[in-house]
C-alpha cells in the first residue's frame, strides 16, 4: 500500500512523462510541417510568348521575376496578360509582342502595329476580314514576323461563256488567259476572246470565247447576159428589134466563209471559174425619122411642140374597143402583131407622129371624150389585155414630130 505522499509522487512522474511525449509529438509535427512548406514553394507557370508556350518551374511570385528566371525580356510596347496567373499557385502569363506588319489589299499597302501572334489574329486585330476564297501569301496559322508583308488577293466572280455554256468562276488575280486555263478551255489559232486574252480580270467581268471556223464553199452562179444595142437608120426612131436573144452563162464561185460561234459573219470570194460564158442579146434601135409632109402647124399645134402627156393602154380585144381589129384610120390591128407603135387620141390629126418618152408613135385611132384633151393618149398594146393593166397609166413627155400623114 502507498501512503498519501507516495501517491502524489507517482502522479507527478506520470504528468512529467505525458508532457515529454506531447513535446516530442509536437516537435515531429513542427518539423514535418516545415519540410512540406518548403516543397510547396516551387510551382509551374506557363509562359506564352507570342503564341509559343514554355513551362517555368519557379518559387517566385512576381510575374516579372518569373520571366527573368526564364530569360524572357520585355520590350516597351509588348503587352503582358497575367489574368490567368495566380502567384504561388501557377497558371499562365501571356506576352503579346508588338510587331509591324504590312498588308497589301487591292493593290494598296498599309502598315499596322499588331500584338496578335498569328497572321489570322493579326488581320482580325487590324479589322481585315479574310474570306475563305481569298488568296494569301502566308498561311493564316503562320506566326507574325516583324516587317512581314501580307498580301491578300480577294476572290471575285467572273463569268465565262464558251461553247454554248456559261459558268461562273472565283478568281483572285490573273488575265483572261488564266481563266481559260482554270476552265480548261483551249483556243484554236483563229479563236479569240472578248475581252482580249491578255486583259486583266476584274470583278464581275464576262469573258466570251468566240470560236472561229473558216469554210470553203462553192456556189454555181448565173452570169447574166448583156444587151448590146446597135443603132439602125433603117428602123423608125424609137422602134427596137431583137436580133438575137441573150443566154445567161454559168460560173462556179468559191468563197471563204467565216463563222463565229456557228454564225456566218463574213464571206470572201476566193475564185471564180466560168463554166459557160453568157451570150449577149443583140438589139437594134431605130433612128429613122418619119417622112416629112411639110406641115409645120395645124389645129393650134406645131411640129417640135413639147407637151406634158398622160397615157393609158389598150389592146385589140372586145373590152377595149369593138374587137373588129380596124382602127378609125383604117389601119388594121390585132393582138400579137409586131411592134406597130400606134396610139389613139382625138386632139391631133390622124397620121400625126408623136414622140412618147423618145419613142415615135403614129396616131391611127380615135376614142372617147377622155382622149380629147391636150396631151392625153392611149397606147396600143399588142401583148393583150393583161399587158394593158401591167403597163397601166402615167405621165409622159410628148413631142410632136409630124402633123397628119
Ligand atoms: Zn383589151
Image (tube, rainbow, N blue to C red):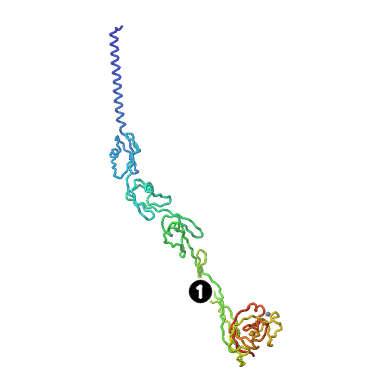
Can residue 243 be seen in the rendering of this structure? no
Residue lying farthest to the front in this orientation:
300
Q: In the rendered view, tell whether residue 312 sits above or below residue 11.
A: below
Quadrant location of the C terminus? bottom right
Q: Position of residue 363 (x, y in %)?
A: 64, 86
- Please give the residue where the numbered disc 1 appears in the rendered image: 271
In this orientation, which residue lies closer to the viewer: 36 or 149?
149
Residue 145 relative to residue 167: left or right: left
> Residue 40 occupies which quadrant of the picture?
top left
Q: Position of residue 7 (x, y in %)?
A: 30, 9
Q: Position of residue 394 (x, y in %)?
A: 61, 79
> Residue 359 occupies which quadrant of the picture?
bottom right
Quadrant location of the N terminus? top left
> Residue 284 occupies which quadrant of the picture?
bottom right
Q: Which residue is at 28% across, 39% downward?
A: 68
Q: In the rendered view, tell whether residue 44 sits above or below residue 31.
A: below
Residue lying farthest to the bottom in this orientation:
294
| Mark 1 burial class by Cα count in 10 Å: few <14, some 14-19, many 20+ | few
Amino acid at each position: 500500500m502507498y501512503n498519501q505522499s507516495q501517491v502524489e509522487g507517482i502522479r507527478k512522474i506520470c504528468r512529467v512523462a505525458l508532457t515529454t511525449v506531447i513535446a516530442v509529438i509536437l516537435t515531429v509535427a513542427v518539423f514535418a510541417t516545415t519540410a512540406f512548406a518548403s516543397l510547396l514553394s516551387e510551382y509551374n507557370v506557363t509562359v506564352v510568348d507570342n503564341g509559343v508556350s514554355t513551362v517555368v518551374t519557379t518559387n517566385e511570385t512576381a510575374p516579372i521575376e518569373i520571366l527573368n528566371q526564364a530569360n524572357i525580356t520585355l520590350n516597351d510596347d509588348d503587352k503582358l496578360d497575367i489574368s490567368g496567373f495566380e502567384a504561388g499557385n501557377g497558371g499562365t502569363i501571356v506576352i503579346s509582342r508588338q510587331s509591324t506588319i504590312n498588308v497589301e489589299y487591292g493593290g494598296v499597302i498599309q502598315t499596322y502595329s499588331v500584338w496578335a501572334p498569328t497572321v489570322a489574329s493579326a488581320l482580325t486585330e487590324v479589322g481585315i476580314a479574310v474570306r475563305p476564297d481569298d488568296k494569301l501569301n502566308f498561311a493564316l496559322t503562320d506566326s507574325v514576323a516583324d516587317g512581314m508583308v501580307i498580301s491578300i488577293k480577294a476572290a471575285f466572280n467572273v463569268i465565262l461563256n464558251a461553247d454554248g455554256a456559261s459558268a461562273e468562276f472565283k478568281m483572285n488575280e490573273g488575265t483572261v488567259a488564266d481563266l481559260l486555263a482554270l476552265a480548261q478551255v483551249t483556243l484554236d489559232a483563229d479563236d479569240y476572246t472578248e475581252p482580249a486574252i491578255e486583259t486583266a480580270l476584274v470583278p464581275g467581268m464576262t469573258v466570251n470565247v468566240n470560236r472561229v471556223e473558216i469554210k470553203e464553199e462553192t456556189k454555181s452562179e448565173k452570169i447574166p447576159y448583156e444587151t448590146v444595142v446597135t443603132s439602125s437608120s433603117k428602123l423608125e426612131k424609137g422602134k427596137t428589134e431583137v436580133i438575137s436573144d441573150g443566154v445567161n452563162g454559168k460560173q462556179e464561185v468559191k468563197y471563204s466563209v467565216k463563222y463565229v460561234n456557228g454564225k456566218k459573219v463574213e464571206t470572201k470570194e476566193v475564185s471564180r471559174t466560168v463554166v459557160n460564158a453568157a451570150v449577149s442579146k443583140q438589139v437594134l434601135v431605130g433612128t429613122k425619122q418619119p417622112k416629112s409632109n411639110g406641115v409645120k402647124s395645124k389645129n393650134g399645134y406645131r411640129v417640135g411642140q413639147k407637151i406634158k402627156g398622160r397615157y393609158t393602154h389598150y389592146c385589140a380585144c372586145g373590152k377595149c374597143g369593138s374587137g373588129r381589129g380596124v382602127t378609125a384610120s383604117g389601119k388594121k390591128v390585132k393582138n400579137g402583131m409586131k411592134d406597130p407603135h400606134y396610139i389613139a387620141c382625138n386632139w391631133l390629126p390622124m397620121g400625126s407622129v408623136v414622140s412618147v418618152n423618145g419613142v415615135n408613135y403614129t396616131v391611127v385611132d380615135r376614142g372617147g371624150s377622155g382622149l380629147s384633151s391636150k396631151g392625153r393618149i392611149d397606147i396600143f398594146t399588142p401583148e393583150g389585155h393583161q399587158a394593158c393593166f401591167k403597163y397601166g397609166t402615167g405621165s409622159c413627155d410628148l413631142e410632136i414630130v409630124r402633123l397628119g400623114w
